[in-house]
Amino acid sequence: MRAKSLQFSGVMPHSMKVSHLDIASDNPLNVHDSHIHTECEIYFNISGDVSFMVEENIYPISPGSVIITRPNEYHHCIYHSNAMHEHYWILFSCTGNERLFNIFFDRKPGDKNLIVLMPEKADLLAKIFDLMLKDDLPEGRKYFEFFNMIEILESGAAGESAAMSEDVVSAIKFISENFSEPIVLRDIAAGLHVSTNTLERHFKSRTGITMREYLCQKRFANAAKLLAESASVFEAYEKSGFSDYSHFISQFKKRFGVTPLAYKKRLFK
């Protein structure tokens, strides 16, 4: 196992965390759960038997693949085996500087997240990541290399999402459009004329999570998004499909590390 991470603070972007991991899928350093965060993220694959889900799309991943997500964009890595997974990733805050990052913001959520690079560009990107992970890299050089990285990503082509079976596509679409309402998962299966067990098996095989987990993650992702848009805690709870307020508070804290109110205050301090 190899793992290295450096965190910086500065003005543009405001903060940045760069990591390099080469670990098996069952290593606790891996994040299997769907998640969102308030930073932009760049994921760069070196090896591993994985794919990536962003919003309603699943993207095939191969060495050199890049996945980008912006604040509040729901995503997770899908592990298909316990093969070693080597990758780089970077989280950076861009608040107030969004105009500098068109590849993140000039698109719909869940669209054009996969960037395909020419081999020489992918090699250069890996060298930049390694350089940025040096402990003695001067602050100015770090930001210079960061924007070199953004320029490389802008030179890439948008990759296509992977094909999925019709029942999984329909289940994802239904949950995504109706998560704010009460949903009975067996009713989704009945509407698709398949058994609940069959649909659950297909869904988890393709997405890496169960339908119930997907529904739960969509609700929490929406609540966090609403809080970031200045909604009250109760509004975020009410508009995201939850039915137990105290359970919402406790589970939000478990997932995000802070209560919904503290999460909101941190964004608007």
Image (cartoon, rainbow, N blue to C red):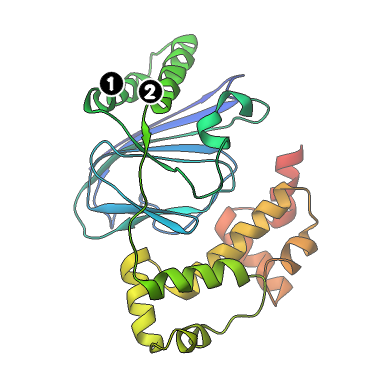
Q: Nearer the viewer, mark 2 or mark 1?
A: 2
Of pointers 2 and 1, the one earlier in the residue sequence: 1
Residue 39 as seen in the image, left or right of residue 236: left
Residue 152: mark = 2
- Residue 29 in the image: above or below residue 116: below
Is residue 253 among the parts visible in the rendering? no
Please identify the quadrant where the N terminus is shown: top left
Task: Report if residue 232 is visible in the image.
Answer: yes
**Residue 60 horizontal side relative to residue 43, left or right:** left
Contact (CB < 8 A) between labels 2 and 1? yes
Q: Residue at x 71, y 54 (%)?
A: 226
Q: Which residue appears at 58% of the width and 20% of the height?
A: 10
- Quarter-of-image position of residue 218: bottom right
Name the residue: 38% across, 25% down. Answer: 155
- What residue would you read off at disc 1? 124
Residue appearing at x 33%, y 60% in the figure? 163
Q: Please, what secondary structure does the residue beneath circle 2 have?
A: helix
Q: Quadrant of residue 165?
A: bottom left
Q: Position of residue 137 (x, y in %)?
A: 40, 13
Indicate the amino acid at tag 2.
Ile
In the visual, does 223 lie left or right of 151?
right
Is 169 situated above or below 107? below
- Count of marks placed on residues: 2
| Distance (Cα) linking label 2 and label 1 | 8 Å
